[in-house]
């Protein structure tokens, strides 16, 4: 029987390493997409006054931006060189694969820093086209990969500067919701709908717009909970085929579920298991030894979703999958959590939360965004299916100084 989530319906790849961000598309282009931009919004046919000269402070920010871009591009070149040699069979050594993984992770951090420096330049000088182009290019890539962290401010700045590419309104609305700027979500959607029609919105956008007032108090409560969380909560590091993902475990809210997860991690159970279902703007599912939704650890644990300390589902929340009552149902058989877990890519609001949230991703949501999309419901018999991304190794990097016994239901 398939296990399910609450909403069922770059990488060291399996064979050939891939950057997942091709150099040609990852390096910010010289032009913004033709469908909109600062020139289009302001009227490219209108003469413009000459911009004021750059100040020393602005020049310094631009210099730092250019330095970071050069650093990042050099990392991409090194990755590409290893990739070419690997693909041609020249060097497929473990050392080179390890070097590629290190470069991949470094490149991801360098791109995030590049984005921050472009933000700083654009905040100081909104007519600096190169910064606008870079921000828009990265935001477009992020939204394509369901990555929204640290994206609200840049999206809003671009729109305020009349860089009016349509996708920016969607990115701004989604990231505003996820960062708790609930009053700004509907205005962004309204502007988009007025120009393009409500039918162009995706399902997730209709969902987010409809649950703002439900999630507003949930988010306030969650922020208070996070601020009060002790600094010794257990942590588990998933080394995946796309990079590292660090999960913090809510031992105080779901102690038995956390103990079960820690025991499975320490036994090596998760090593090599695939993320067999990854759906844009919804979820990533893993922990199934069968790889098709039917596998378990052989043991089941009691639910902890009804504890007073329970946590709700937000982006990055990690919760247990359970056996559905039927293939068409969003209801679940009680106490059937085992080994499968779900990472929420968006807040998931079931009619009655009956799955245990036992942690959240604190680093690596951009890694998860790079996972290969796999939707078993859309698989066709004659379709070539590339291997899903997987957990290479999982290890506990921090836990409290006590035993973690597990209570099982069967």
Image (cartoon, grey):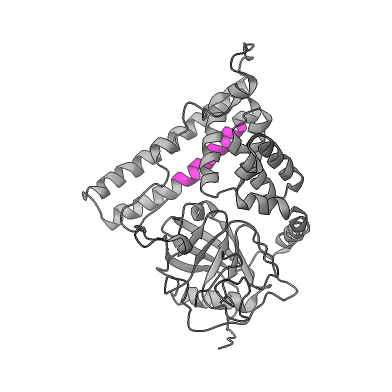
Query: Can you name the residue that lies furthest to the left here?
Result: 90
- Vertical placement of residue 35 versus 353, above or below: above
Residue 151 at least partly seen = no
Quarter of the image where the C terminus is located: bottom right
Q: Nearer the viewer, residue 92 or 160?
A: 160
- In this rendering, would 228 be left or right of 146? right
Majority secondary structure in the magenta region: helix
Rendered location of residue 300, percent (x, y): 55, 83
Q: Nearer the viewer, residue 46 or 195?
A: 195
Choose top left, top right, bottom left or bottom right for residue 322: bottom right
Magenta residue span:
107-120
**Magenta run includes residue 347:** no
Rendered location of residue 225, percent (x, y): 73, 63
Query: Can you name the residue that lies furthest to the bottom here?
Result: 410
Residue 391 at least partly seen = yes
Q: Nearer the viewer, residue 237 or 331?
A: 331
Residue sitting at x 59%, y 23%: 40
Choose top left, top right, bottom left or bottom right for residue 331: bottom right
Rendered location of residue 73, percent (x, y): 41, 36
- In this rendering, would 11 be left or right of 354? left
- In this rendering, would 80 be left or right of 335? left
Rendered location of residue 20, percent (x, y): 41, 47
Q: How many marks?
A: 0
**Magenta run includes residue 117:** yes
């Amino acid at each position: 029987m398939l296990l399910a989530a609450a909403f069922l319906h770059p990488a060291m790849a399996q064979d050939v390493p891939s950057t997942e961000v091709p150099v040609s598309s990852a390096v910010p282009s010289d032009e913004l997409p033709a469908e909109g931009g600062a020139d289009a919004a302001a009227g490219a046919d209108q003469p413009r006054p000459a911009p004021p000269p750059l100040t020393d402070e602005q020049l310094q920010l631009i210099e730092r931006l250019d330095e970071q871009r050069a650093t990042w591009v050099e990392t991409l070149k090194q990755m590409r060189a290893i990739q070419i040699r690997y693909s041609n069979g020249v060097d497929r050594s473990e050392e080179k694969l390890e070097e590629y993984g290190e470069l991949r992770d470094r490149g991801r951090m360098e791109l995030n820093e590049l984005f921050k420096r472009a933000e700083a330049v654009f905040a100081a000088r909104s007519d600096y086209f190169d910064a606008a182009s870079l921000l828009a290019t990265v935001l477009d890539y992020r939204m394509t990969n369901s990555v929204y962290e640290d994206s609200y401010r840049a999206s809003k700045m671009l729109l305020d500067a009349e860089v009016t590419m349509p996708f920016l309104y969607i990115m701004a609305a989604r990231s505003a919701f996820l960062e708790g700027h609930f009053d700004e979500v509907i205005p962004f959607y309204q502007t988009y709908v007025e120009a393009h029609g409500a039918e162009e919105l995706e399902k997730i956008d209709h969902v987010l717009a409809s649950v703002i007032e439900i999630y507003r108090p949930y988010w306030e409560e969650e922020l208070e909970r996070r601020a009060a969380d002790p600094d010794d909560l257990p942590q588990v590091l998933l080394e995946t085929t796309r990079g590292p993902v660090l999960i913090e475990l809510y031992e105080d809210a779901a102690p038995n579920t956390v103990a079960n997860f820690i025991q499975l991690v320490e036994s090596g159970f998760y090593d090599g298991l695939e993320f067999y279902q990854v759906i844009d703007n919804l979820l990533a599912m893993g922990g199934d030894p069968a790889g098709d939704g039917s596998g378990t650890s052989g043991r089941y644990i009691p639910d902890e979703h009804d504890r007073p300390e329970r946590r709700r589902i937000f982006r990055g929340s990690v919760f247990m999958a359970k056996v559905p009552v039927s293939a068409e149902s969003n209801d679940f058989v009680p106490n059937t959590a085992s080994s499968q877990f779900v990472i929420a890519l968006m807040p998931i609001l079931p009619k009655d939360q009956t799955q245990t949230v036992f942690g959240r991703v604190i680093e690596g949501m951009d890694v998860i965004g790079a996972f290969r999309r796999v939707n078993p419901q859309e698989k066709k018999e004659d379709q070539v299916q590339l291997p899903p991304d997987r957990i290479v190794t999982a290890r506990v990097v921090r836990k409290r100084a006590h035993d973690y016994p597990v209570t099982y239901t069967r």
